[in-house]
């Protein structure tokens, strides 16, 4: 806060001292017969401050200039009319020019575009005109001159002062904020010393010789200063010419002395010359500044793009029309292990495997012919160690006007880790699926007989009942139970019982037709599901199974009994039921079980069917 206050105080002091000094010099050395100064740059100082400061600072500076103007005029001419009118005219003029300049040219980066110059000149003409008219009407009687002469003298003097001085001060203050002039502007001035010296030399030649009209000699060095220093060079060069011309005018030296008329007329000629030179060089300077700004912006954007390209993992590339690399981002070295510098100029297919090269060549030809504008593919590139790397490629066609192909652009990324991870994920998923199926199979399979267990059979029965009902086909269920199985376990042990269960399961499987399902649904209980079979067909299948089991001789080996082999025969009882329209899995099983129990009660080794 203290720093800002000191800067503000410095600005106020510089403004007051500068305005007073310029006004005093102008009135003392360039006073015209009508009583007004021939050159008046003081108001341009206030205009520049208003254009480059905040509104509050502008208001304070305006009040300070008004007070300084009153004090100065009271010192020179104590006429009350002038003491009130002239300060007001100074302040109003400076404020109007500043406000209209902001209106016509905008407030951002003044005098960096050609349109700013036109806007400022128009603002100066409109802004100075009211004060010129007012001063001409108010001061003409006291100065013994016509209102037109007084008003014209004011307008010409103040307009030229604004046009010549204000832009230079705006450029200086906008660029360095006055407090930074020493650090930022002096190096620029040092670089531009030669063109400014040439301008001064040309000015001395133009304004000190008498015999030849050499005003055009000032143009080349002024343009040179403009090209070297931009708007600042144009402003300083014009200021140098103005100072030299003013000194020569006052001292009566040079071609201006040959101009017929009063000193005022000669002064107008000088100011018109200086203004013309400035208005000639300033647009050139703004065009150069605009071009420099666009170039710097393009360089910054290019640098930003290069920085981004070099930081991302994807390889950005560009090829020429023949498919040779012309640009590769630094990620190329990380992906392939090859130097970018060594790869530039080589065909992009150089390190592509043969089996992939043909596919990419066809894609490149389609892009080159304009059949497609962009494409993408997954392919491979061989790195420096000879290892294939999986890459994902995105490419588009570059073209100029007339659809002329100038190459390809795009990017590719190394997806080797992703492909490896994907393959590992797929392997694990397949393994998990196999494990899940194995677990599911184990959960639905009887370990001893390898037949479907009760859970699996119940699920299949539910599905078959729904399907056969929708399709209108018959479905039958056979309930099977081994007769006197408990005696086998009690007499020969559980190992013998397990052997009997396995053999009976095998016999039942052999006895069934294709598509039939047999499952172990209890200790010595089995269930047979016959899709498409009515009760008559189911009874035929059941009798065949009944006979096959009864005819089978099961040898109980010495390993089981600890003795010589012993033949064993077993029988089974069967209950048969056909699914009705209203049957559920539970009711169908219940009807088949009832017929099974009936077979047991009637003597076993027999089949009983439901009515």
Image (tube, rainbow, N blue to C red):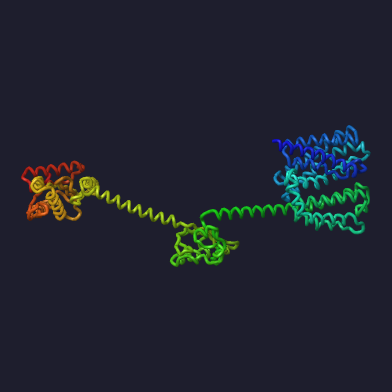
Q: Quadrant of the C terminus?
A: top left
Please identify the residue farthest to the front as the structure is shown.
562
Say whether residue 611 is visible.
no
Tell me the residue at 77%/53% (across/down): 190
Say whether residue 133 is visible.
yes
- Tell me where residue 177 appears, x and y as whole percent: 73, 43
- Tell me where residue 248 appears, x and y as whole percent: 90, 51
Q: Does 319 sit above or below residue 551?
A: below
Q: Does 163 sit above or below residue 339?
A: above
Q: Is residue 461 left or right of residue 542?
A: right
Q: Quadrant of residue 343?
A: bottom right
Q: Is residue 525 left or right of residue 105?
A: left
- Out of 83 and 71, give the one closest to the viewer: 71
Q: Quadrant of the N terminus?
A: top right
Please identify the residue farthest to the left as the structure is shown.
603
Count how many numbered circles sit on residues in the image: 0
Q: Is residue 22 left or right of residue 446?
A: right
Tell me the residue at 18%/44% (across/down): 580
- Tell me where residue 67 appears, x and y as whole percent: 82, 34
Please identify the residue farthest to the top as the structure is shown.
80
- Tell me where residue 439 appears, x and y as whole percent: 27, 49
- Out of 247 and 585, give the one closest to the viewer: 247
- Out of 579 and 398, give the one closest to the viewer: 398
Q: Is residue 146 left or right of residue 164?
A: right
Q: Does 130 sit above or below residue 367?
A: above
């Amino acid at each position: 806060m203290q720093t800002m206050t000191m800067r503000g105080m410095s600005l106020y002091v510089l403004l007051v001292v500068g305005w007073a000094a310029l006004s005093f010099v102008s009135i003392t050395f360039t006073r015209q017969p009508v009583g007004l100064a021939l050159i008046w740059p003081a108001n341009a100082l206030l205009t520049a401050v208003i254009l480059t400061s905040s509104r509050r600072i502008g208001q304070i500076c305006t009040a300070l200039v008004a007070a300084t103007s009153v004090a100065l005029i009271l010192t020179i001419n104590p006429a009350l009319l002038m003491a009130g009118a002239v300060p007001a005219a100074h302040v109003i003029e400076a404020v109007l020019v500043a406000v209209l300049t902001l209106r016509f040219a905008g407030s951002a980066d003044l005098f960096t575009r050609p349109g700013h110059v036109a806007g400022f000149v128009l603002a100066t003409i409109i802004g100075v005109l009211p004060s010129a008219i007012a001063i001409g009407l108010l001061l003409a009687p006291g100065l013994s001159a016509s209102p037109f002469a007084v008003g014209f003298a004011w307008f010409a003097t103040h307009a030229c002062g604004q046009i010549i001085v204000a832009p230079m001060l705006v450029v200086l203050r906008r660029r360095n904020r006055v407090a930074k002039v020493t650090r930022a502007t002096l190096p620029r001035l040092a670089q531009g010393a030669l063109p400014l010296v040439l301008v001064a030399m040309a000015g001395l030649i133009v304004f000190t010789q008498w015999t030849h009209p050499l005003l055009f000699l000032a143009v080349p060095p002024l343009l040179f200063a403009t090209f070297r220093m931009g708007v600042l060079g144009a402003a300083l060069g014009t200021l140098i010419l103005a100072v030299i011309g003013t000194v020569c005018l006052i001292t009566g030296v040079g071609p201006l002395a040959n101009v017929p008329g009063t000193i005022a007329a000669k002064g107008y000629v000088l100011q018109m010359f200086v203004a013309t030179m400035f208005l000639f060089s300033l647009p050139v300077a703004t065009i150069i500044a605009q071009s420099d700004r666009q170039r710097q912006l393009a360089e910054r954007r290019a640098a930003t793009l290069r920085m981004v390209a070099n930081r991302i993992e994807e390889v950005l590339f560009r090829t020429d029309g023949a498919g040779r690399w012309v640009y590769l981002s630094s990620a190329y070295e990380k992906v392939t292990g090859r130097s970018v510098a060594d790869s530039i100029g080589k065909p992009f297919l150089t390190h592509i495997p043969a089996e992939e090269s043909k596919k990419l060549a066809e894609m490149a030809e389609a892009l080159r012919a304009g059949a497609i504008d962009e494409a993408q593919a997954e392919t491979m590139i061989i790195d420096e160690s000879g290892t294939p790397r999986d890459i994902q490629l995105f490419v588009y066609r570059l073209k100029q006007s007339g659809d002329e192909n100038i190459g390809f652009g795009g990017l590719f990324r190394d997806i080797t880790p992703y492909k490896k991870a994907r393959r590992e994920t797929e392997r694990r998923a397949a393994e998990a699926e196999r494990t899940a199926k194995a677990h599911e199979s184990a959960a639905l399979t009887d370990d001893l007989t390898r037949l479907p267990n009760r859970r699996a059979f119940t699920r299949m029965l539910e599905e078959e009942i729904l399907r056969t009902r929708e399709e209108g086909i018959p479905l039958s269920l056979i309930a099977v139970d081994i007769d006197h199985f408990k005696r086998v376990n009690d007499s020969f042990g559980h190992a013998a019982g397990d052997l009997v269960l396995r053999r009976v399961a095998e016999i039942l499987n052999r006895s069934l037709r294709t598509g039939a399902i047999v499952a172990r649904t209890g200790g010595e209980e089995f269930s047979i599901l016959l899709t498409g079979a009515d009760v008559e067909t189911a009874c035929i299948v059941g009798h065949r199974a009944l006979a096959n089991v009864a005819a089978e001789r099961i040898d109980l080996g010495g390993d089981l009994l600890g003795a010589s082999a012993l033949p064993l025969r077993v029988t089974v009882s069967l209950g048969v039921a056909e699914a009705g329209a209203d049957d559920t899995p539970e009711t169908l099983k219940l009807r088949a079980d009832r017929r099974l129990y009936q077979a047991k009660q009637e003597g076993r080794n027999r089949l009983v069917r439901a009515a």
